[in-house]
Structures are given as structure tokens and as C-alpha cells.
Amino acid sequence: MSGASYIYCGWVMHRRVHPRRHHFRYRAWWLLLDLDELPRLAGRLRWFSLERFNLFSFFERDYGHEPATLREQIERCLEEAGVAFDGGPIRLLCMPRVMGYAFNPLSVYFCHRRDGRIAALVYEVHNT
């Protein structure tokens, strides 16, 4: 997609043995999106939009829980946790909306320091 944002493909698997056996495995894909790069991606990619309908769409309201931007929310979360963060890139691994449909059970924010090292990971869980 770009120098900071990528598409990742993989598998999702679940296995339970109690109280009754259940198992599934299927292919899945996720986007790793640099939060600062979102407007440029939406302007450059035909099938990806920011805050509007498209084949693939990203709406900030699908993530976080405050009126502040995602970056502001994550920076505040890091500050409250006492994590030393110097304003480096924040990248979000998530599933965007596809044809308007949102299914995103887990989002992971990769918070990097300016020197490229990881400062923290923040998990956002949306259980149905």
C-alpha cells in the first residue's frame, strides 16, 4: 500500500474442547494503517476511503471511544499507563469496513518511538 501501511494475510483459528467440541479455521486479512498517513492513502487508493463509503472504508468512530482523534486517545492511554512515548508513528492493525460492513473483533495499535523502536502495543477488543 505504501511505505508505512501494509496488507497482511493469514489464518484465524479457534478450537474448543469443553463443554462441547468446536473448531474452525479460515483465511483472513488485515490492514496495518499509519494513523498519520490515512488522508494520503484515501487520496491515492481508488478502493479505499476515509470517513465515507467505498469498497474498503476507514471510519475513526469504529475505533476508540472518545470524540478525540485516535492518535490523541492512544497518546493519552500511553501517558496514563506511564509509557515513555515521544510522538513517533502509531500504526493500527485492523479490519476496515468492507462494502459498509464492519467486523473488527480486535484492533492492535503499534506505538513506535521516533527512533523506530516499539514503545507499546495497545489492544482494543470489540466482542459481539
Image (tube, rainbow, N blue to C red):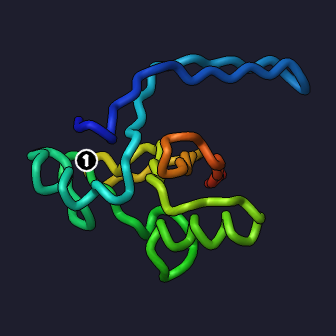
| Residue 42 shown left or right of residue 84 in the figure | left
Would residue 12 be visible to someone looking at this image?
A: yes
Would residue 107 be visible to someone looking at this image?
A: no
Residue with the most extreme front position: 115
Within-10-Å neighbours for mark 1: few <14, some 14–19, many 20+:
many
Q: Secondary structure at mark 1?
A: strand
Screen quadrant of the N terminus: top left
Image point 27% across, 67% down: which residue?
51
Q: Provide the residue designation for mark 1.
A: 56
> Of residues 56 and 78, which is closer to you in this image?
78
Tell how many labels: 1
> Of residues 8 and 35, which is closer to you in this image?
35
Query: x, y percentage for residue 70?
Result: 47, 67
Image point 28% across, 54% down: which residue?
37
Image point 69% across, 69% down: which residue?
79
Residue with the most extreme bottom position: 67
| Residue 43 shown left or right of residue 124 in the figure | left
Query: x, y percentage for residue 71?
Result: 47, 66
| Residue 36 shown left or right of residue 43 in the figure | right
Q: Quadrant of residue 40?
A: bottom left
The amino acid type of the residue labelled 1 equals Phe
| Residue 82 shown left or right of residue 106 in the figure | right
Q: Is residue 65 above or below residue 122?
A: below
Image point 41% across, 52% down: which residue?
102
Residue with the most extreme right position: 19
Query: x, y percentage for residue 124?
Result: 62, 54
